[in-house]
Image (tube, rainbow, N blue to C red):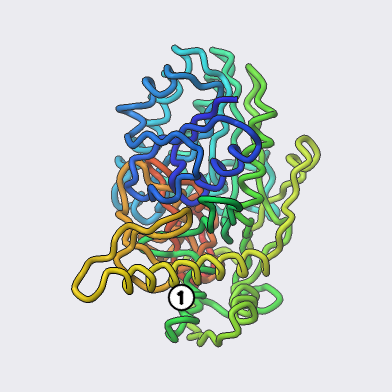
Amino acid sequence: MRVLVTGGAGYIGSVVAAQLLAAGHEVTILDDLSTGHSDAVPQGAHFVKGTLRDCVAEVLADGADAVVHLAAKSLVGESMADPSKYWSGNLGTTLTLLEAMRVIGVRSIVFSSTAAVYGEPERTPVLETDPLRPTSPYGGSKTAIDTTLTEFARLFGLAPVSLRYFNVAGAHHVAGEGGGWLGERHHPETHLIPNTLAAATQGRPLNVFGTDYPTPDGTCVRDYIHVTDVADAHLRALDACEPGRHRIYNLGSQAGFSVREVIEVCRDVTGLDVAVTEAARRPGDPAVLVASSERIKAELGWTPTRDLRAMAADAWQFTQAQARAQADRAAAEGPGQSNAAAEGPGQSNAAAEGPGQSNAAAGGPGQSNAAAEGPGQSNAAAEGPGQSNAAAEGPGQSNAAAEGPGKTNAASEAGPSPKAPGPATS
């Protein structure tokens, strides 16, 4: 199958593209690199640098059987400050994509949505049939896209599948020549796991907002899914596209993990201590945000296979690989020279920030799956319960995983993430 992946140079998009290639599909990636990375484009994929508005019709006309749409803007805090950017950058560009698909005759599309469409749910785990009450323009734009997909299916026979999830974490290893680690590279970073790893390596404290929630250890609980499992769900969804029917699935762990659990696992994986500063709750952070994935398990056979330790361990491998790459570049270039673009999937074009950090440009169409920010967070991709630089996101946060034109996987610490109130940390 010939598949167009929008936002395929971002965190989630690059892993989806790598898995599509491994499954034998022909892959074209459209990304403007505003938050994606050219070195994250998997070997074997055809890469087109550009925006959906300017390029998607021409790219589709060159030959495509299906679309995986991950390109989007995804910072909750930014969407509150500049809502028109999100309505235009998310809904507007998706309308351009859908109209091009209609005219050219491409029907199948898998849309990377977000659990932020549920806002602050009345119950957990959240079901696909629960009310949609987005609390930010980011979540509102994703809700509007889901509504549009339903209408295009009804009126024009489109075959859409929407995937809704909170926090994506971990890293994916591509084997073989030209392979390497694909992981999170956001600037700023707002996700819990990469921020906890950064705190461990840099010897700085991690702020945890709220330790008196009605949860087993007093800290917020959020859903985390390994990026490899999320990519697998996208491939399964591609096979489930049905003309005239809009399928919607949540991706969830069914249980979730607390901020303290995430921090402790990161300590164990790295063998390093992480100092924690406890602070008061932030307004609007729900105690628990978890999604039910019973529907996709029953209909498509998908279940998450990698646990929290695997997410932290793989993210740590990616962080170390980036640190080694930066050291090698610095040694090769010599004093007074600038750091050149990194090589290989999973390495950063960063000039030299901390391990696992990148100098990637933020904002603008072509951003990728930012974990959005939750209450009290900004420019964050999403954070885990009570985290600020956290990956976790709750209602109103972004799919931290999506990327490409218009998306960004930024995260903050242990605070509510931009997509939905995430764990409170910073």
SS for callout 1: helix
Q: Is residue 140 visible?
A: no
Question: 109 or 27, which is in the foreground?
Answer: 27
* Apparent side of residue 68 relative to residue 376 in the rendered image (left or right): right
Q: Where's residue 274, x and y in %?
A: 53, 84
Residue bearing the label numbered 1: 198
Quadrant of the frame with the N terminus = top right
* Image quadrant where residue 23 sits: top right
Crowding at dot 1, Cα within 10 Å, few <14 / some 14-19 / many 20+, comes out as many
Quadrant of the frame with the C terminus = bottom left
Q: Where's residue 236, x and y in %?
A: 69, 36
Question: 288 or 199, which is in the foreground?
Answer: 199
Number of numbered callouts drawn = 1
Kind of residue sitting beneath label 1: Ala
Residue found at x 42% / y 46%: 138
Residue found at x 41% / y 46%: 407
Up/down of 80 relative to 236, above or below: below
Up/down of 53 relative to 14, above or below: above
* Apparent side of residue 51 relative to residue 325 in the rendered image (left or right): left
Question: 265 or 416, which is in the foreground?
Answer: 265
* Image quadrant where residue 112 sits: top right
Residue found at x 42% / y 25%: 97
Q: Residue furthest left?
A: 336
Q: Is residue 175 visible?
A: yes
Q: Where's residue 91, x and y in %?
A: 40, 33
* Apparent side of residue 235 relative to residue 59 in the rendered image (left or right): right
Residue found at x 44% / y 41%: 7
